[in-house]
Amino acid sequence: MKETINVNIAQQAFTMDMDAYSALTSYLDDIGRRLPENDTETLADIEARIAEIFRERVPSPMMVITYGVVRNTMSQIGSAENFGAASRPLNNPAEKDSTTKLYRSRKDRSIAGICSGVAKYFGLDTTLVRIAAILCIFAAGATLWIYLILWLVLPYEPEA
């Protein structure tokens, strides 16, 4: 059983499985970063051509577009490298660097480094996070348990 999603490509509705959707999204993102920033017309034309190919291969709107159909469509249009060199970095929110991961602080710590790690993660002042944690511990007892669990679960930040 596969999860499906309804998408709108060039103002036409399609039902795609999640594998096909993620492949098509990464393909279009890769093409988009190779085009000039203000060139939205070319990307719209590519999406329109993709919609035409999907309509040819999947005649009924009730049918689901699979990964194989998307892969064949991408090979028919061509690889993203055909559109030039990448001029912008790939925006992938799944890839985070080590500065945005939640760690316990090694240097700026009062008890376990949890508050300073949370402050660094969210870009806040450590003192404000500590005051908020103390107030929450006295206001609601679950905060203490959350703090203890974070103390056990969070790793120390990597040494520089």
Image (cartoon, grey):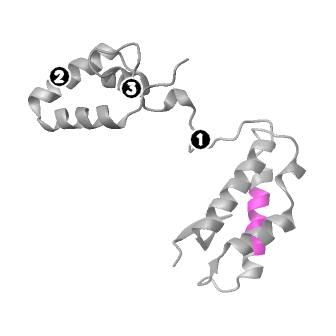
Q: Nearer the viewer, mark 1 or mark 3?
A: 3
**Would you place residue 82 above or below residue 103 in this image?**
below
Splitting the image into 4 quarters, where does residue 150 fall? top left
Specify whether residue 149 is painted magenta: no
User: Is tag 2's residue or tag 3's residue first in the polypeptide sequence?
Assistant: 3
Q: Earlier in the sequence, mark 1 or mark 3?
A: 1
Image quarter of residue 46: bottom right
* Magenta stretch, main secondary structure class: helix
As measured in the structure, the alpha-carbon distance from the residue carrying label 1 to the one carrying label 3 is 20 Å
Marks 1/3 in contact by CB < 8 Å: the verdict is no
In this rendering, position of residue 134 left or right of residue 31: left
Q: Callout 1: helix, strand or loop?
A: loop
Q: How far is disc 2 from disc 1 in space, using C-alphas?
A: 33 Å
Q: Residue at x 85, y 63 (%)?
A: 77
The first of marks 2 and 1 along the sequence is: 1
Query: Nearest the camera: 127 or 90?
Result: 127
CA distance separating discs 2 and 3: 17 Å
Give the amino acid at mark 3.
Arg
Q: Are marks 2 and 1 in contact (CB under 8 Å)?
A: no
Q: Amino acid at mark 2?
A: Ile
Q: Residues within 10 Å of mark 3 (few under 14, many from 20)?
A: many
Query: In front of the other: label 2 or label 3?
Result: 3
Q: Nearer the viewer, residue 126 or 70?
A: 126
Disc 3 on helix, strand or loop?
A: loop
* Residue 5 percent across, percent down from the top left: 54, 69
Residue of label 2: 134
47 in the magenta segment: yes
Task: Give the residue number, with chain letter if any, for mark 3.
Answer: 104
State whether residue 32 is above or below residue 53. above
